[in-house]
Image (spheres, coloured by chain):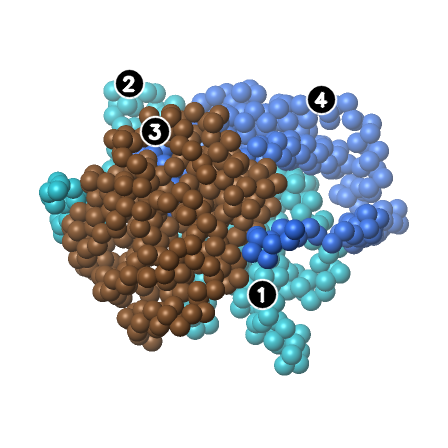
Amino acid sequence: MVSTTEAAPPIATPAAAVFDRVRLLVLPVGFGVGLLLLWQALTVIFHYPKVILPAPSDIFAALTGNFAMICQQTIPTMRDALAGFALAAVFGIAMASLFSFNKLLRAAIYPLIVVIQLVPKIAWTPLFIVWVGIGWQSRLTIATFIAFFPIFIAMMAGLEATDRSLVRLCQGLTTTRWRTFWLVRLPASMPYLFAGLKIAITLAVIGVIVAEFISASEGLGFLILRSAALLQTDVIFAAITVLCVLGLAFYGAVHAGEIAVRKWHGE
Amino acid sequence: MITVSAETLAASPASASIAPQAAGYVVVEGVRKIYNAGSRQPVEAVAPTSFTVKAGEFVSLLGPSGCGKSTLLMMVAGLDAPSQGTVSVAGRAMTSPRAETGIMFQDPTLLPWKTAIENVVFPFRAMNRPVALAFDRAGALLDQVGLHGFHHHKPRQLSGGMRQRVAICRALVYEPDLLLMDEPFSALDAITRDEMNLVLMKMWQEHRRTALFVTHSIREAVYLSDRVLVMSRRPGRIIEDVRIPFARPRGLEIGETVEFNEICGHLRSKIEHVPH
Amino acid sequence: MSDIGALPAIETPLRRDFWLDLGDLGRRGVGLVAPPAVAATVLLGGWELLSRGGFLSARLLPAPSKIFDTLVRSLGVLMEQAQPTFWGALAGILCAAALGIALGLAVSYSRTLMEAVYPTIVVFQLIPKVALAPVFLLWFGTGFAANVIFSVFIAFFPVVVATITGLQAAPANYERLCRSLMMSRLRMFLTVKFPFALPHIFSGLRIGVTFAVIGVVLGEFITAQTGLGYIILFAANNFETALLLAGILLLCGVGIVLFVFFLALETIVYRAYDSR
């Protein structure tokens, strides 16, 4: 008979469990930090020209050195992106809600929207510049346009996805279509809507950046483009870092909004 | 009757010298399984428990949901390791899977992009054994379970019961000496389930392997087995070992006899239901 | 001879009239296409009438007829400029696919690699990659290759994430089955897990195609030398709105061709490995 200890693996000890959990945290963080250190080391050792690839320390220096200027350029970008997102949300939710009441309208317009999606929306940027001119107008328009579609489509999907039996229950109770919408279909579409909102806010920022690339008047995108022309790569990366933080903050805000709505709805 | 080809005998290790029926001798000794040991909430899935399965026996593990019977089966398969105790099959400790064990799950687990016969032949590919001979054997098995004419159907063209029949063939095609089955018919409706019990009985009769069958259906356990082991609620432990006296071959009609129902009643009284 | 104990034959669907089926399909197809077709016609017609009536500024929004006219007249130039855009996007997505799938496979295979690298990939996803376009300009200049490289960079991430997600898509029992059949882990990854990952991978590729086109067009916007992006920008600068819209139409065409290409690829692959 084979002995017990030989056959069975050692029972996991408390130490082993802690090690496991630490490993889950340490490995990714370690990898990330390792990459940063490697980056720093390579640029220093090989004397990589700052123009090609600035070291993390250079980027940090550029960030702190130009902080005021970067902040100044962040404001128009942030403002236009948020405004565009808000407008897109209002239009998207309203239109999707309206469309949900009429099946024929849905069947007619929805495929057209899908076809429009085939063109990358940034390609429309020059058209908007022609229509509303360079400046905050075109940035706002483009941000709204880009952010609109994910919200609209997500909201439509959410309203469609309402459990058929729930809807039939309401019909059986002779609820008006408006109340069915308000009490059942709207709450049911929330998860879909928030998924769309998260995508939309990211796209709104991207839309503004692209508009700034093309129209080059102000904002973080303009700053990046100008810094590229001036070969100030460290400033570029500093601006991108700020963009990342901005994007994360916006995404987090939408997520917080989702949690708030869930709590309010009593889940 | 399917004959064992010389190359399969050559391919399988020491147990080849013993007739297939004598191998597949399962010994579970003091086996215990704890999940998340060392964390704040360790879960004991299987309490220290022991049992044996003699060669050629059909034994059922019967118990309520979550009692650890599937966990026990996975340990006999060598797919999971006990936290304490030993599991051995044919004298060898099960620290890793064994080529002479056949396994069936609740889900047929067929590869959707392969036809029925290709699925049955799959174990030969997996074990890097020559496949050419396997096709004949696979075809014969599929005919035996009543799937003549469906050899080249894809799983999505087959009903749930038919897919499980393909799974039975796949489990038998490489002549295992031990058959492990984890609630293979639980997902089927009652009528199909009876049919599948018949099919399993027929195939098991022909190929007389040792079998360990996990189920939560009392009638199924009594109908199919030589012995029924009842497991307690989690943490699971064998609390009853009932010998089933009916002679083989058994028809479905024994389910109507008094003796059958008495045994079922006895088993039912032993099963501790999860409190509501 | 009918045997009551025999296993039932699979039912064949009721034989329906061929023409009824065709008519039914036709009716459903019409029902799907008619409303949007009507809506599009109404919108286009209304647009045309408003333009003719002088309600719409010809400079800002020319009539559909003018756009079509411009399209036909400038077709040569537009098609010529569509080449770098199309081939750039195609090269971008194909390279991104190769790199992305390879990395996805590698990361999924090794648990250590997965735990270390995956969070970094997720972090990279958060970076608005289009903002890096000027950096790529700095690094790689303004040629076609630079556009492609940028395009690969953007399209790469959705493919990796999709591959990783897809490789976890196979239900757990498949891995158990393969292990019980002593299949090597690498073999299991390539012959079982990968086919199950295909639906996810294709969905990631679809997203990747969109991103690749965006990358190429954005590159053309910034470098303003060749391609449909350049034409659109050029038209905007000269207030040639009709040319602008013709360019966008052609860009739509590029998107459609790429979409059809990947649809064909999907169909071919699914012929052999359909896991849906």
* Colour of chain C as rendered: blue
**What residue is pinned by disc 3?**
B9
Q: Mark 2 lies on which chain?
A: A
Q: Which chain carries label 3?
A: B
* Colour of chain A as rendered: cyan
Q: At 28% from the left edge and 18% from the top edge, which residue is drawn?
A: A46
Instruction: Answer above or below: position of A190 versus C214.
Output: below
Callouts 1 and 3 in the same chain: no
Q: Which chain carries label 4?
A: C
* Colour of chain B as rendered: brown
Q: Given this view, does label 2 or label 1 mark the residue nearer the observer?
A: 1
Q: In which quarter of the image is the C terminus of chain B?
A: bottom left
**What residue is pinned by disc 2?**
A46
- How far apart, in angstroms, are the residues tagged by discs 3 and 2? 64 Å
- How far apart, in angstroms, are the residues tagged by discs 4 and 2? 43 Å
Give the camera-side residue of B235 and C96: B235
Q: As shown in the figure, which amino acid type bears the numbered disc 3?
A: Leu
